[in-house]
Image (spheres, rainbow, N blue to C red):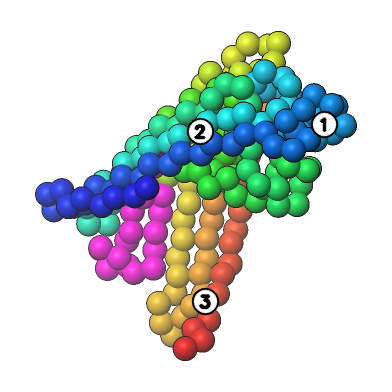
Amino acid sequence: MGHNLALGEGSLKTDLRYFRTTSDGKNGSAAGRAAGYTANTTFGDGTGEVDNNTWSAAFTYSLGGHALMLGYQRVSEDSNFVQLNQGGIEGSAGASAYLLTDRLANSFTRAGERTTFGQYSYDFASVGVPGLKAAVAYLKGTNIQVRNAGDAKEWERDIALDYAFQDGALKGLGLGWRYGVLRGNAATDVDQNRLIVSYTLPLM
């Protein structure tokens, strides 16, 4: 659910999300899970049964070219947040988690995880450089429930820089750089650099 509110010379955007995922079919029985119809058993209660509530709230204040977002997300403790299967292990993988915490290196969806996050972005069009945008984000997840191992935590820092050519022979061409760092004791550390080239072709 989203809402925009004029606030002074800027605007405040509210973004609220809630997901409820439960077991169905063979995942709902011990025999079915023993046969392989299971979610991740490393986190949560260890049964592999899908039983999760996840909610998040984010507030973004925009003024001129500036935008500052602050948010919080909470995942319930029995199982990880599980999204629709889109080509991975049956019933436990997906290309997008549809969450505000779905970022470059991580999605912060482990059982019990409580994530505080913030992002600052700037659109350089406000100073006469249309097409150039930059952003930096930081996310910190705590209270991750690791079966038989206590709590774990993790954090991620992301930097993004994008430029889209506005005119001339290169109009429609976009260049992007992403740099992400993930650290913690819930999974393997990650360092990623991505270069993105895109092209927008007007058809009408």
Q: How many marks?
A: 3
The circle on residue 5 is none
- Residue 8 in sight in this render: yes
User: Residue placed at 39% from the left, 59% from the top?
Assistant: 133
Q: Earlier in the sequence, mark 1 or mark 2?
A: 1
Compare residues 117 and 74 and report the one nearer the observer: 74
Q: Residues within 10 Å of mark 1 (few under 14, many from 20)?
A: some
User: Residue placed at 54% from the left, 36% from the top?
Assistant: 20
Residue located beneath label 3 in the image? 200
Say which amino acid is labelled 1: Gly
Q: Residue furthest bottom?
A: 204
Q: Residue furthest left?
A: 8
Residue located beneath label 1 in the image? 32
Say which amino acid is labelled 2: Thr
Q: Residues within 10 Å of mark 2 (few under 14, many from 20)?
A: many
- Residue 137 in sight in this render: no
Q: Earlier in the sequence, mark 2 or mark 3?
A: 2
Question: Percent position (x, y) of residue 120?
Answer: 35, 45
User: Residue placed at 56% from the left, 69% from the top?
Assistant: 198
The circle on residue 54 is 2
* CA distance separating discs 1 and 2: 25 Å
* CA distance separating discs 3 and 1: 47 Å
- Residue 155 shown left or right of residue 189 in the figure: left
Q: Which residues are magenta?
A: 117-135
Q: Is residue 110 above or below residue 91?
A: above
- Residue 188 shown left or right of residue 171 in the figure: right
Q: Is residue 24 above or below residue 86?
A: above
In what element is the residue under mark 2? Answer: strand
Compare residues 196 and 37 and report the one nearer the observer: 37
Q: Quadrant of residue 36?
A: top right
> Can you tell which of label 2 and label 3 is closer to the viewer?
2
Q: Residues within 10 Å of mark 3 (few under 14, many from 20)?
A: few
